[in-house]
Image (cartoon, rainbow, N blue to C red):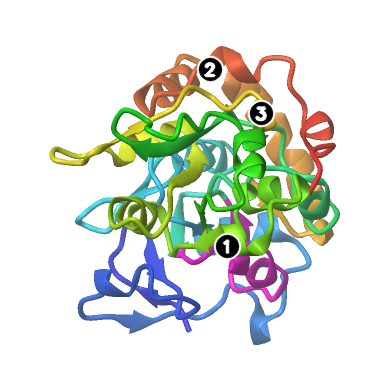
């Protein structure tokens, strides 16, 4: 069962331990639709209750939970702004593992996913994505100096002894699987910080994650560096993901999102989190949903 931390909007899902340490005194919440069933009209329900329940991953710069419980990051900030244009006051974030996001959405544990859940064929077959708000590249975290000179997925395939850290259920796992990187070369980690720790402890030789996510993980004293974007990994993007039964909401959301993209506020949010607002220009969900995996 999810729990609410404070008025601003953080829940922590009991689906994983990633956010459990954030909890203090908590009260339980009730799903927006009676009996835990999806609302027949998500827009009407969200306006009445004053919020959307949103699955996040607490992976900056895509999503972030502040020490006071505030849900922020590029995707939640854009979701909140567009929701307000639709007459929905706020969002309530639920921290959950990537592999649980779509099942939880379909089970009505939340109304939307805004977590850098990159578009690919298998996901687009299960959810209705908004138009993209982020277009991203992938990189490796490597030991300082990159002693193995690992810069491509082909380099990984060429060395069966090399171990790659990867978050299960993430887009990066799909990249490795699509490239036929053997399972025994993949080292599963819980999140970005766990991946860095696995790299530094020698449990993996490289760690695969979006370029900006890795750059956001670098702290004083960390002895690793981030490679240039991987040339044989697909560039991808993400937007808000909804149940396919909520297509009327998605249509209304896309209308407001298109208008919001033309504002200075959209540019400010993108640049605040290190993204290029021009990168999404002309890129559609239909295009990104052609990514394999």
Report, in whole angstroms, how far the alpha carbon at label 2 lies from the one at label 3: 15 Å
Boundaries of the magenta span? 95-113
Q: Where in the figure is residue 3, as x and y percent of width and height?
A: 38, 77
Q: On the image, which quarter does residue 234 sit in?
A: top right
Report, in whole angstroms, how far the alpha carbon at label 2 lies from the one at label 1: 29 Å
Mark with earlier residue (1, 3): 1
Q: Which residue is mark 1?
A: 168
Up-down relation of residue 287 to residue 208 (above or below)? above
In the image: residue 153, left or right of residue 266: right
Mark with earlier residue (2, 1): 1
Q: Where in the figure is residue 182, as x and y percent of width and height?
A: 69, 58
Circle 2 SS class: helix
Q: Nearer the viewer, residue 33 or 119?
A: 119
In the image: residue 270, left or right of residue 64: right
Report, in whole angstroms, how far the alpha carbon at label 1 lies from the one at label 3: 19 Å
Residue 144, disc: none
Looking at the image, which residue is at 64% across and 22% down? 259
Looking at the image, which residue is at 31% across and 41% down? 217
The reply to whether callout 2 and callout 1 are in contact (CB within 8 Å) is: no
Up-down relation of residue 142 to residue 112 (above or below)? above
Q: Nearer the viewer, residue 199 or 247?
A: 199
Mark with earlier residue (2, 3): 3
Q: Where in the figure is residue 87, as x and y percent of width and height?
A: 56, 44
Residue 235, disc: 3
In the image: residue 126, left or right of residue 149: right
Tell me if residue 32 can be seen. yes
Q: Nearer the viewer, residue 220 or 88?
A: 220
């Amino acid at each position: 069962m999810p729990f609410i931390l404070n008025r601003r909007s953080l829940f922590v899902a009991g689906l994983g331990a990633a956010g459990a340490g954030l909890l203090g005194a908590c009260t339980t919440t009730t799903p927006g639709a009676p009996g835990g069933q999806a609302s027949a009209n998500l827009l009407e329900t969200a306006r009445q209750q004053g919020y959307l329940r949103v699955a996040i991953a607490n992976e900056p710069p895509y999503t972030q939970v502040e020490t006071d419980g505030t849900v922020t990051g590029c995707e939640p900030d854009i979701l909140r702004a567009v929701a307000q244009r639709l007459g929905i006051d706020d969002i309530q974030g639920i921290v959950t593992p990537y592999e649980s996001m779509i099942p939880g959405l379909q089970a009505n544990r939340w109304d939307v996913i805004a977590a850098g859940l990159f578009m690919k064929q298998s996901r687009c077959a299960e959810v209705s994505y908004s138009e993209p708000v982020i277009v991203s590249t992938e990189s490796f975290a490597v030991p300082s100096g990159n002693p193995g000179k690992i810069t491509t997925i082909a380099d990984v395939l060429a060395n069966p002894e090399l171990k790659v850290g990867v978050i299960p259920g993430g887009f990066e796992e799909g990249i490795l699987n699509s490239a036929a990187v053997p399972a025994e070369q993949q080292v599963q980690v819980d999140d970005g910080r766990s991946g860095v720790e696995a790299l530094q402890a020698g449990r993996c030789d490289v760690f695969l994650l979006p370029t900006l996510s890795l750059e956001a993980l670098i702290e004083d004293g960390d002895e690793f560096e981030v490679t240039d974007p991987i040339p044989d990994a697909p560039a991808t993007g993400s937007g808000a993901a909804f149940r396919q039964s909520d297509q009327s909401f998605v249509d209304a959301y896309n209308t407001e999102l298109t208008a919001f993209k033309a504002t200075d506020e959209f540019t400010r949010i993108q640049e605040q989190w290190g993204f290029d607002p021009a990168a999404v220009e002309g890129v559609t969900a239909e295009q990104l949903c052609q990514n394999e995996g």
